[in-house]
Each structure stands twice: as structure tokens, then as C-alpha cells.
Amino acid sequence: MKIRLQPLATTELVDAERRRRLAIGIPHGAGRIQVRDGDRSFINLAMTAARLALDAGSKSGDYRWQDPERDFEWILSDNSRAAMDAQTVVEIGQRSLALISSLGITASNLKGRIRGGEQIFDIRNNRFWADRAAD
């Protein structure tokens, strides 16, 4: 029998786990939308454009809210595509913000515990994380 020892958590490992969970992202249909650092600027731009389209009268089910010549599509983490109306894009932005906030607060709390001298092992364990969605 092989025993696998878990490393003692450091603040750097906490940050790495937060980033890993953001990369897993949020579920959307059968896929997932990643919320990595680079993805967030696109999410913000898309959400702003979608908000403007809604303010201009875009309706639910209108996938051509951004370009009248083609549907707005989001490329999911598995490289599949999902057509989205403006309302859905705003919801993606809101859900992304909720995940970023939740993971940030959890990471901050964990780092405070570590700095306070608590020994935490297996930082990837879902019991430490508010999102509890990581694989």
C-alpha cells in the first residue's frame, strides 16, 4: 500500500488552487466557461456590450445582438461553441463575478489561517473551498 503525503499548504499553494478553480470555471449547458485572468477581460467586454444591447432593446433569444450578420457565440473550455443572447452573457458575467469573489474570499481566509500558524494539508480538498465544484 502506497501512502501519499499531502504537502503543507503555503499561501502560494492557496493562490495556485484559486487559479486552478477559476480555470475550471462555471458550468454552462454541457460545457464550462473558464474564468482565468485572461478570460476575465473578455467576460467584462462581452458583458458590457450585452448590457448596452439590452438597453437598446435586444430581446431574449436574439443571438445576433452583437452583429446582425452572425450569432454571438462563446467558445467553451472543451472548444465547443454556445450561441448566447445578451441576457445570457450578462448572467455569465454575474456568475463569473460571484465565483471570483467567492474564491478570493476563501483564499484570503485560508491564507490568514496559514499566516496565523495553522497547518493545513491537502489544499485542493473541496472542504476548504466555497465553490466546492473543482474536480
Image (spheres, grey):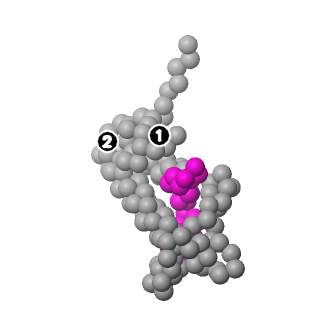
Tell me where residue 35 appears, x and y as whole percent. Answer: 53, 59
* Residue 125 found in image quarter: top left
Question: Farthest bottom residue?
Answer: 56
Residue 14 image point, x, y percent: 45, 48
Rendered residue at 62%/54% (across/down)? 77
Name which residue type carries label 2.
Answer: Gly
Find disc 1 in the rendering and name its residue: 124
Residue 123 vs 41, above or below: the answer is above
Q: Residues within 10 Å of mark 2 (few under 14, many from 20)?
A: few
The residue at the point 37 percent across, 41 percent down is 128
Q: Which residue is drawn at the image coordinates 68% and 75% (left, top)?
A: 70
Mark 2: secondary structure: loop
**Along the viewing direction, whichever of 37 and 97 lies nearer the viewer:** 97
Depth check, front residue: 103 or 108: 103
| Magenta region, residue range | 26-47
Number of callouts: 2
Q: Is residue 40 above or below residue 66?
A: above
Q: Kindly identify the amino acid type of the residue bearing the numbered disc 1.
A: Arg
Say if the magenta span includes residue 42.
Answer: yes
Residue that label 2 marks: 117
Q: Quadrant of residue 67?
A: bottom right
Would residue 112 be counted in the magenta stretch? Answer: no
Q: Given the current orientation, which residue lies at the most extreme left position?
A: 116
**Looking at the rendered structure, which numbered label has been put on residue 58?**
none
| Helix, strand or loop at mark 1 | loop
Which residue sits at x=50%, y=54%?
Answer: 26
Residue 15, compared with residue 125, is above or below; it is below
State the CA–CA distance, disc 1 to disc 2.
19 Å
Return the disc, 1 or 2, that comes first in the chain's sequence: 2
- With 49 as the anchor, is 127 left or right in this view? left
| Visible residue check, residue 117 | yes
Which is more foreground, mark 1 or mark 2? Answer: 1
